Image (cartoon, rainbow, N blue to C red):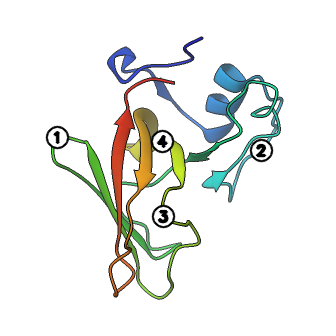
Amino acid sequence: MSYISVSDKKTFGKIRDVCNRLFHTNYKDCRGMGWFKPRTFKKLKLDKYKLWFPKIGHDKATGWENRLVKNETEIISKNDSEKGKALPGQENITFAYIGNKYIFKGVFRLLDPIDPDGTEHWIRIATSV
């Protein structure tokens, strides 16, 4: 079963729209939920993944800088003051926040090792889920 593909180029206004329309949740509000596992993922057999909603560019509110590089097949992610909580090998279904909308960019896996300065390199491993 496929929920979405990069080639669909479908956009969403809010995180809850992604969750409710694609993954059958009934969320009212998802503020502050930029990286998490929806409660429906086990039933949908997606429990090895988390959802990730990185803002591309620098997010002053969170301190994260995220860049899409290499023809959108890699995300380089770094925080101004803290290291991320993801472990190498973590796989995320990723909807990048670009220009006031979320767009599916693929499934990304965190490479090992994480750079000494905390920079994370996420490589796209799938273009649909």
**Which of pointers 2 and 1 lies earlier in the amino acid sequence?**
2
- Confirm or deny contact between disc 4 and disc 3 (CB under 8 A): no
Q: Is 124 in front, or is 80?
A: 124
Q: What residue do we see at 65% from left, 29% from top?
A: 17
Image quarter of the N terminus: top right
Question: Which residue lies under the disc numbered 1?
Answer: 71
Q: Considering the numbered disc 4 on the image, is that residue within a helix, a strand or a loop?
A: strand
C-alpha distance separating marks 2 and 3: 29 Å
| Residue 125: image location, x then y, percent | 37, 38
**Which of pointers 1 and 3 lies earlier in the amino acid sequence?**
1
Q: What residue do we see at 54% from left, 55% from top?
A: 90
- Confirm or deny contact between disc 2 and disc 1 (CB under 8 A): no
- Confirm or deny contact between disc 4 and disc 2 (CB under 8 A): no
- Confirm or deny contact between disc 4 and disc 1 (CB under 8 A): no
Residue 26 in sight here: yes
The residue furthest left is 70
| Residue 56: image location, x then y, percent | 35, 54
**Which of pointers 2 and 3 lies earlier in the amino acid sequence?**
2
**Which of pointers 4 and 3 lies earlier in the amino acid sequence?**
3
Give me the disc on residue 88: 3
C-alpha distance separating marks 1 and 3: 22 Å
Q: What residue do we see at 77% from left, 22% from top?
A: 24
The answer to whether 3 is drawn above or below residue 99 in the figure is above
Give me the disc on residue 96: none
Give me the disc on residue 29: 2
- In the rendered view, does 111 fall on the left or right side of 19? left
Q: Count neighbours of disc 2 (C-alpha within 10 A) and say few if under 14, some if 14 to 19, many if 20 or more.
A: few
